[in-house]
Image (cartoon, rainbow, N blue to C red):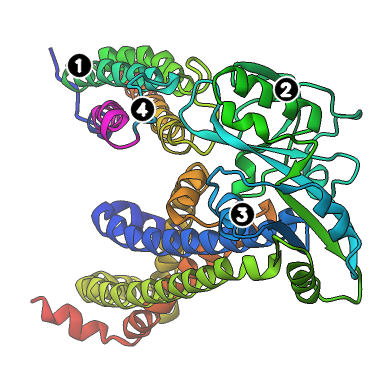
């Protein structure tokens, strides 16, 4: 079996996914716990984003290691719904805090949305690269 | 034109390095300009948002008022309601509107307290002008007007002291700490106070909104000085201190001026540094490409054509790098405006669409100008080089 050529998306996808997972915990985390130790709802948005980021890191790792171009394209296609869902987690899927000047609104939400959109664009580019290469290969086969 | 693009595409490493400089230049010009414009707009908005020329508060509560209005630290203080009438009778006072500050509380889910401000809709001139969508009727009991930073839309409910209140209207964003407050009428305020007392905050029971007020917003008549009216009130009415709002924001204006100067210097420094680095880079690149240009001369390219190729490459690098830099700057400045505001601790309001586009245009232009400017000398060198000598050098 012929191995597929490494493309920039093989590197960008795992980096962005890992940034999403680790960033949600260390860089753009949600609001801290209340004085009584309980968490506000935004904490669960952070946990969800962390989980989704971990899943996407594993999937994009598989994408980087995949041999065939078709498999890479398939993995990128499967990542798109996850990326859209991730962008919707803070604020839409999980409610954030009551004040828009709180950390979950000012840091976590914009960072998660931006990284998700960058992931979405990267996946779309990867699918485009895949379709072009597959197209070229089919023409050659004919 | 085709040759310019082929040159750029065929040497991706070289193009990327020059692009990076242009991106950095445009990013810093756009980011810096937007920050300064946002701070200026925030200050203008604060002056307009306060609405009053003078604010009267109880003696010794001046600092607390500044904490509430400028720092967003929720608090409360009270004085006799009789003072409102005394202030209204002071010479030079055109209109007065009392406000009542309720003790800070944690709103619903969150640990951050919210300032609740009671206002008199009939005399008010500082809250209602900022209502985004008119509610078309009087503020009903158990209804509030929410500041722009309160994460609730019109029709939704908020809970304070386990008492549910409906959001009847939302205020426009002003970029000030007053965006974090909730405004309501006397009846709702009494209900909230009752709910607070029921929850065990008995200390609040004695603060009857029918007998006490926290502050009185004052509009000064034309021809009178706010400074004079403020000092008149402070001297003649016992236990009342009046503050000229212009003086109150002067500290913020000083901080803003310092930040503006620093950002301006930073932009100039980055621009100069980028110009020097780009000039050196272009000079080294042209030196490397001497033989390429000599061959082009041999196959018929004029001296002007060679210079135009060098300038064209620099122009497109500046244009593309500028566009990417502005895009990256927009991604940093717009979505994270709340975070920047919190870190700076100053009123911060994103500029209008027109002003933002102007800043974007200026940033791209600075990058576009930098490209040809730094490559001009190299273009002249290319057009004057001795083709024969260069080709012989290689043999």
Q: Are marks 1 and 4 on the same chain?
A: yes
Q: Are marks 1 and 4 in contact (CB under 8 Å)?
A: no
Q: Which residue is mark 4?
A: A35
Count the labels in the image.
4
Say which chain tag 1 marks: A
Vertical position of residue A69 compared to residue A12: above or below: above
Q: Which residue is mark 1?
A: A62
Tell me the chief SS of the magenta region. helix
Query: In the image, is residue A21 part of the stretch drawn in magenta?
Result: yes
Per the rendering, the mark at residue B65 is 3
Q: CA distance from mark 1 to mark 3?
A: 58 Å
The percent position of residue B347, horizontal first and vertical second, equals 57, 55
The percent position of residue B98, horizontal first and vertical second, equals 79, 48
Q: CA distance from mark 1 to mark 4?
A: 42 Å
Where does the magenta region start and end? A12-28
Q: Nearer the viewer, mark 1 or mark 4?
A: 4
Can residue B169 be seen at all in this image of the molecule?
yes
Q: Residue furthest left?
A: B395
Per the rendering, the mark at residue B191 is 2
Q: Give the SS element for disc 4.
A: loop
Q: Nearer the viewer, residue B359 or A124?
A: B359
Can residue B348 be seen at all in this image of the molecule?
no
Label 2, residues with CA under 10 Å away: few <14, some 14-19, many ≥20: some
Q: Earlier in the sequence, mark 3 or mark 2?
A: 3
């Amino acid at each position: 079996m012929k191995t597929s050529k490494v493309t920039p998306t093989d590197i960008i996808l795992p980096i962005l996914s890992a940034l999403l997972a680790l960033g949600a915990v260390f860089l753009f985390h949600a609001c801290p716990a209340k004085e009584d130790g309980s968490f506000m709802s935004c904490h669960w948005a952070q946990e969800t984003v962390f989980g989704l980021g971990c899943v996407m890191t594993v999937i994009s790792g598989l994408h980087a290691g995949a041999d065939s171009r078709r498999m890479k394209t398939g993995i990128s296609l499967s990542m798109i719904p996850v990326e859209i869902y991730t962008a919707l987690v803070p604020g839409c899927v999980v409610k954030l805090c009551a004040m828009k000047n709180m950390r979950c609104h000012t840091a976590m939400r914009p960072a998660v949305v931006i990284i998700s959109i960058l992931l979405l664009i990267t996946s779309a580019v990867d699918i485009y690269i895949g379709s072009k290469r597959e197209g070229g290969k089919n023409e050659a086969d004919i | 034109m085709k040759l310019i693009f082929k040159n750029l595409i065929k040497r991706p490493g070289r193009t990327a390095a020059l692009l990076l400089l242009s991106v950095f230049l445009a990013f810093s010009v756009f980011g810096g300009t937007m920050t300064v414009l946002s701070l200026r707009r925030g200050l203008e908005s604060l002056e307009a948002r306060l609405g009053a020329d003078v604010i009267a508060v109880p003696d010794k509560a001046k600092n607390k008022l500044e904490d509430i209005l400028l720092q967003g630290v929720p608090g409360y203080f009270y004085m006799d309601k009789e003072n409102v009438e005394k202030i209204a009778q002071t010479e030079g006072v055109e209109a007065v509107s009392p406000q009542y500050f309720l003790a800070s509380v944690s709103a619903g889910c969150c640990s951050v307290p919210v300032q609740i401000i009671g206002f008199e809709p009939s005399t008010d001139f500082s809250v209602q002008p900022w209502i985004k969508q008119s509610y078309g009727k009087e503020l009903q009991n158990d209804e509030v007007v929410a500041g722009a930073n309160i994460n609730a839309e019109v029709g939704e409910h908020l809970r304070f002291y386990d008492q549910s209140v409906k959001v009847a209207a939302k205020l426009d964003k002003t970029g000030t700490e007053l965006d974090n407050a909730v405004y309501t009428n006397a009846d709702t305020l009494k209900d909230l106070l009752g709910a607070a007392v029921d929850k065990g905050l008995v200390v609040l029971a004695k603060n009857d909104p029918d007998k006490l007020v926290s502050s009185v917003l004052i509009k000064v008549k034309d021809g009178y000085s706010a400074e004079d009216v403020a000092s008149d009130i402070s001297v003649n009415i016992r236990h009342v201190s009046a503050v000229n709002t212009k003086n109150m924001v002067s500290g913020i204006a000083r901080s803003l001026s310092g930040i503006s100067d620093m950002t301006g210097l930073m932009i100039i420094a980055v621009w100069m540094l980028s110009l020097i680095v780009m000039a050196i880079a272009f000079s080294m690149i042209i030196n490397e490409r001497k033989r390429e240009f000599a061959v082009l001369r041999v196959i018929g390219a004029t001296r002007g054509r060679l210079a135009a190729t060098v300038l064209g490459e620099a122009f497109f690098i500046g244009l593309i790098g500028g566009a990417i830099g502005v895009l990256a700057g927009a991604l940093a400045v717009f979505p994270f405006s709340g975070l920047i505001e919190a870190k700076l601790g100053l009123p911060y309001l994103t500029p209008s669409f027109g002003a933002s586009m102007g800043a974007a245009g200026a940033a791209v232009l600075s990058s576009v100008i930098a490209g040809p400017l730094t490559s001009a000398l190299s273009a002249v060198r290319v057009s004057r080089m001795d083709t024969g000598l260069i080709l012989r050098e290689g043999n």
